[in-house]
Amino acid sequence: MKEQSYIIKNAKSFEPTHIFECGQCFRWNIQDDGSYTGVVGNNVLNVKKDNLNIIIKGMCQENIEELCNKYFDLNTNYEEIKQKLSLIDDNLKTSIQYGTGIRILHQDIWEALISFIISANNNIPRIKGIIERLSKKYGKEIEWNNKKYYTFPTPEELQNASVKDLRDLGLGFRDVRVFETTRLVRTKKINIENIESLENIPVLRDILLQFPGVGPKVADCIMLFSMKKFEVFPIDVWIKRVMTELYSQQIKEKGFCCKVEKGLINPNNKQILEFAEYKFGKLAGLAQQYLFFWRRELN
């Protein structure tokens, strides 16, 4: 492990605040100088934007350039994606202007699985606190710039945690879910190795739904934020509200929902998902991120 650095010159579609504050990750924290520091696998990275350049430095076990190319999905042309989505309608065009620097991170599947189980009925500060305590107790320590960081525990490391241990870390009702999920992965009763290569989204979703605490929304978050399945469209309370506010009339006109309550069109999650697939196609997950970030920024 050694200190390394990497500069992305004339970076387009890369705004650290947009990437790390759009709800897709929980291990990145803003620093006094406006940069962000986070733990990625067995590496600690600091990311700072300097005019048009992205300066990345850190204590790394891997080659920092290869790590960043994969993790930040640098080989995907987000300028082209934004251009395609902007042509769909004015809502997307406006939302992209707000979140123009969003990139979907290519996170570790195991870490995403546990993290989004923890995210259920939770808020981001509390999620981040739980994950940090979990990592500090069961992960490996990395020291950099006189500060200590901790890797996310592997299934082998986390198998040492009892339900009570997890409860003591503040997981609440999620303690049993994380315990059982760890056991299922550790014993390979459900194998998450190489599932990223599966192209059939319903089959992949069914595999993830076998884990305790994984519902449709969590499964879709895992697929979008760790497997680059851009066609999935995670629906939580917030995105349901956004889609209802922006698209309820279109959802009704296109025949996806005919339910009207107190004069308002009220589509359910299934109808919103079907409409999103129709409206946004293979880029539905990215459309969701732009819309989510935009409407949250307005509040």
Image: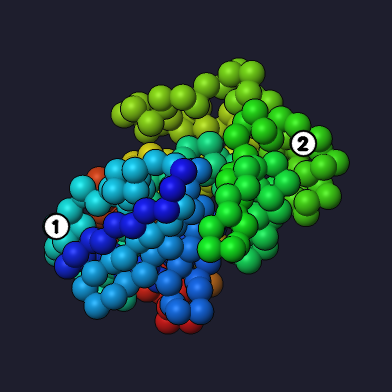
Q: Position of residue 221 (x, y in %)?
A: 47, 47
Residue density around tag 2, few if under 14, some if 14–19, many if 20 or more, within 10 Å: some
Q: Mark 2 — residue?
A: 161
Q: Nearer the viewer, residue 269 or 79?
A: 79
Q: Nearer the viewer, residue 202 or 118?
A: 118
Q: Position of residue 215 (x, y in %)?
A: 57, 41
Residue depicted at x 53% and y 36%: 110
Specify the label residue 80 is tagged with. Answer: 1
Q: Is residue 187 above or below residue 240?
A: above
Q: Is residue 237 visible?
A: yes
Q: Nearer the viewer, mark 1 or mark 2?
A: 2
Q: Position of residue 261 (x, y in %)?
A: 52, 66
Residue depicted at x 73% and y 46%: 137
Left or right? Give the position of 163 relative to 248. Answer: right
Q: Quadrant of residue 92?
A: bottom left
Q: Nearer the viewer, residue 267 or 186?
A: 186
Q: Is residue 240 visible?
A: no
Specify the label residue 44 is tagged with. Answer: none
Residue density around tag 1, few if under 14, some if 14–19, many if 20 or more, within 10 Å: few
Q: Label 1, label 2: how many angstroms apart (C-alpha)?
A: 45 Å
